[in-house]
Image (cartoon, helix red, strand yellow):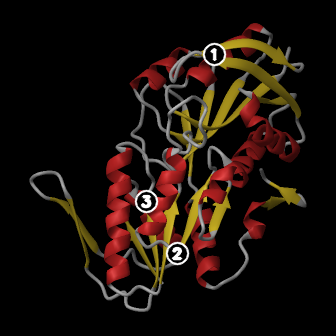
């Protein structure tokens, strides 16, 4: 077994290798003067079970193309099996035609991954779980919730209500509420644009309660900040938010600093520098991904990695 890393999240790839107890394999990734990506595999991979760790976070197109080229290089080097380990799957929000004459880019990316030579995919907390069906190869879909639950359990929060900031995240919020033995609420919203949302109402009792907002990803933090403001107005005490993928841009950082959110809990599926004036707790999913890679390599079941209290974590 060999694990290679693209340039998107090398620290996570190294942490996965440290967890498994093998060295990170060596490859050269460089750019030609015109910006084209050059890849060279510096180890013999003939007949090997190969894993490529690459989060398709911004710059998304560059990281995707880099992964495609790495897969092609490994395929032409006679690797026995190639698994794309994508802690964050870019373009996942474009999973359907929600208006006329638009693409289903999540499906296009799936086609390109397969065409590049991938034999299977390992990913985490997809924005839309039906994306697994866009592939004609096996997809192992993990959840960050066991890692987050272990952290939240130590905080021992009383009078906790788990809140979904929209209807689409209700299933994930329900899973968290079961794990934490907490009540469930939802914030109804209407999206104005890609970066703005209009909140309408809170469904559930949150007055005098501690609140945990649950979402799969945030970029501009419009949904989280707006939901937190409404929850605070309705009597919420401490407000925490947990997101698997915090792909924060400048607008998102500014909104979070001004928001009513006391702590943002996220994971290292995407890299992010330290941000002054913002309380962010970053939990590592390296152990979870490392265990999944070991089981895939040994043809063992990964089901137990997302089962909890006799049920699924999401």
Distance of label 2 from label 1 (alpha carbons) = 41 Å
**In this figure, which residue is indicated by the disc labeled 2?**
119
Please tell me which residue is depicted at 59% across the width and 70% down the height of the picture.
137
Under tag 1, what secondary structure?
helix
Point out residue 56 in the picture as x, y percentages from the top left corner: 44, 51
Seen in the picture, residue 65 relative to 231 is either above or below; the reply is: below
Under tag 2, what secondary structure?
loop
127 or 205, nearer to the observer: 127
Q: Is residue 68 left or right of residue 254?
A: left
Please tell me which residue is depicted at 13% across the width and 58% down the height of the picture.
32
Q: Nearer the viewer, mark 3 or mark 2?
A: 2
**Mark drawn on residue 13:** none
**In this figure, which residue is indicated by the disc labeled 1?**
226
Under tag 3, what secondary structure?
loop
Q: Which of the marked residues, 2 or 1, is nearer the chain's N terminus?
A: 2
Seen in the picture, residue 32 relative to 21 is either above or below; the reply is: above
Point out residue 219 in the picture as x, y percentages from the top left corner: 50, 31
Seen in the picture, residue 112 relative to 22 is either above or below; the reply is: above
Residue neighbourhood size for the residue with mark 3, other residues' Cα within 10 Å, grouped as few (<14), some (14–19), many (≥20): many
Distance of label 3 from label 2 (alpha carbons) = 15 Å
Point out residue 290 in the picture as x, y percentages from the top left corner: 57, 69
Residue neighbourhood size for the residue with mark 2, other residues' Cα within 10 Å, grouped as few (<14), some (14–19), many (≥20): some
């Amino acid at each position: 077994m060999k694990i290679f890393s693209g340039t998107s999240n090398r620290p996570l790839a190294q942490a996965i290798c440290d967890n498994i107890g093998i060295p990170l394999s060596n490859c050269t990734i460089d750019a030609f003067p015109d910006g084209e990506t050059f890849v060279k595999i510096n180890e013999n991979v003939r007949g090997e079970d190969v894993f490529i760790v690459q989060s398709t976070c911004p710059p998304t197109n560059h990281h995707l193309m880099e992964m495609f080229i790495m897969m092609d290089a490994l395929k032409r080097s006679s690797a026995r099996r190639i698994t794309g380990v994508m802690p964050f799957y870019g373009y996942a929000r474009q999973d359907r035609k929600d208006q006329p004459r638009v693409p289903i880019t999540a499906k296009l990316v799936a086609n390109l991954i397969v065409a590049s030579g991938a034999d299977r995919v390992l990913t985490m907390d997809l924005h839309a779980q039906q994306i697994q069906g866009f592939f004609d190869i096996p997809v192992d879909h993990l959840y960050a919730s066991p890692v987050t639950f272990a952290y939240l359990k130590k905080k021992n929060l009383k009078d906790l209500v788990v809140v979904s900031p929209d209807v689409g995240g209700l299933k994930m919020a329900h899973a968290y509420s079961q794990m934490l033995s907490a009540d469930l609420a939802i914030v109804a919203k209407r999206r104005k644009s890609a970066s703005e949302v209009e909140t309408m109402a809170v469904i559930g009792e949150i007055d005098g309660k501690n609140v945990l907002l649950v979402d799969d990803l945030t970029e501009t933090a419009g949904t989280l900040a707006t939901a937190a403001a409404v929850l605070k107005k309705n009597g919420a005490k401490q407000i925490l938010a947990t997101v698997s993928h915090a792909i924060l841009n400048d607008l998102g950082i500014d909104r979070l600093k001004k928001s009513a959110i006391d702590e943002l809990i996220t994971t290292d599926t995407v890299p992010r520098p330290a941000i002054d004036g913002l309380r962010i707790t970053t939990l590592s999913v390296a152990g979870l991904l490392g265990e999944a890679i070991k089981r895939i390599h040994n043809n063992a079941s990964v089901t137990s990695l997302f089962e909890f209290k006799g049920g699924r974590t999401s």
